[in-house]
Amino acid sequence: MNAVLRQYTGASALIDQLARKHQDVQALLESIPGFLAYYAVRASDNLTTVTVCESQEGAEESTKRAAAWIKENLPGLTMAAPRVTEGDVFISFSS
């Protein structure tokens, strides 16, 4: 299992657009082979997204799709590129 975290700063416009179009984002990510979960966490005007997939390839594809979605849905957005962290999930549990 792999996860990718994308951390965006000064992302108010992105947060608003994600909230408005969350069903589009859901459909986009759920179509990735091996997709398991997606989370978007807002902290003021900062955003962290977490995508969990069965494989590294799925996690990498989610990053490609996220960038393409932002470019398509927020074409005039001036925001720093996200900090991306990707790796193996070695502990996982939920209630």
Image (cartoon, rainbow, N blue to C red):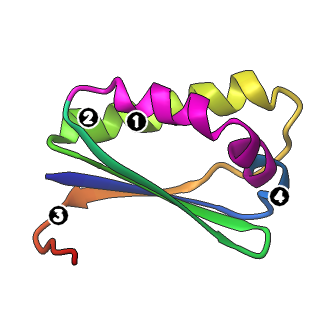
Q: Position of residue 51 (x, y in %)?
A: 37, 50
Mark 3 Cα-neighbour bin, 10 Å: few <14, some 14–19, many ≥20: few
Say which residue appears at 71% left-offset and 48% top-offset: 19
Q: Which residues are magenta?
A: 15-33
Q: Residues under labels 2 and 1: Cα distance? A: 6 Å
Q: CA distance from mark 4 to mark 1?
A: 21 Å
Q: What secondary structure is found at the residue carrying circle 2?
A: helix
In the picture, measured across the screen, residue 70 lies left or right of residue 31, that is right
Side of 76 where 49 appears, left or right: left
Q: Where on the picture, by quarter, is residue 35?
A: top left
Q: Which residue is mark 2?
A: 58
Mark 3 belongs to which amino acid? Val
Q: Which element type, helix, strand or loop, lies under badge 1?
A: helix
For badge 2, the amino acid type reads: Gly
For the residues marked 3 and 4, what is the alpha-carbon distance in whole angstroms?
A: 29 Å
Residue 68, position as x, y percentages in the image: 59, 25
Q: Earlier in the sequence, mark 2 or mark 4?
A: 4
**Of callouts 4 and 1, which one flags the residue occurring earlier in the amino acid sequence?**
4
**Is residue 13 placed above or below 71 in the rendered structure?**
below
43, above or below 31, in the image? below
Residue at 49%, 35% (x, y): give it: 26
